Image (cartoon, rainbow, N blue to C red):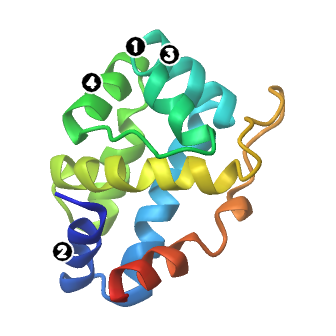
Amino acid sequence: MSLLDSLGSLLGGNQGGANGASSLVNVAGQLIQQAGGIQGLASTLQQHGMGDAMQSWIGNGANQAISGDQLNQVLQKSGLDSVVNDAAGKLGMDPGQLMGQVAQVLPHAVDHATPDGQAPASGGGFDLSTLGGLAEKLLAAKTA
């Protein structure tokens, strides 16, 4: 399922419009935040064999895809799966379905938060405001 399909299924569901895209971006942002920021997420993905994908998201080239199953495995091993599971409960969605959609949005969220192609220095927390405008950007791509 493509990002546009993921957004379409969420937008067609009970979330509707910008709220659906914002919900996905918020879950991705919370995941980054709970992982310890971009550096923390990079370290987690590197430890579980997904470092190349993460580096493609940070860099200026094309973003390497990650499946919902791959993301789920990494999150379970690192104890971060509760972020998506909690969000799924709040959104009234199946956690597996949400995991697949977050796997589509997460590369865009990391890419958006690292516009210069470099991960921010470690030690600082992740500011969710860095993802401002991403939902609108994804919606614009959906309607284009």
| 3D distance between C-alphas at marks 3 and 2 | 30 Å
> Would you place residue 1 above or below residue 103 in this image?
below
**Residues at discs 4 and 1 in contact (Cβ within 8 Å):** yes
Q: Is residue 112 above or below residue 33?
A: below
Q: CA distance from mark 3 to mark 1?
A: 5 Å
Between discs 2 and 4, the one toward the N terminus: 2
Query: Cβ–Cβ below 8 Å for labels 3 and 4?
Result: no
Front label number (3 vs 4): 3
Identify the residue position indicated by label 1 in the image: 48
Residue 109 screen position, x and y as percent: 54, 54
Element at badge 4?
A: helix
Vertical order, 135 against 60 (above or below): below
What distance separates the C-alpha of mark 2 from that of mark 1? 29 Å
Indicate left or right for 46 with 118 as reference: left
Name the N-terminal-most of marks 4 and 1: 1
Q: Residue at x 53, y 81 (%)?
A: 136
Query: Residue 122's quadrant in the figure?
Result: top right
The kind of secondary structure element at disc 3 is helix
Alpha carbon separation for disc pair 2 and 4: 23 Å
Q: Which residue is mark 3?
A: 46
Residue nearest the observer in this picture, 10 or 55: 55
Residue type at numbered disc 3: Gln
10 Å neighbourhood of mark 2: few (<14), some, or many (≥20)? some
Task: Look at mark 4 in the image and give the residue it sits on.
Answer: 73
Helix, strand or loop at mark 2: helix
User: How far from the left and from the top, in percent, is residue 110?
Assistant: 58, 47
Determine whether the residue tagged by mark 1 lies in a helix, strand or loop: loop
Task: Look at label 2 and name its amino acid.
Answer: Ser
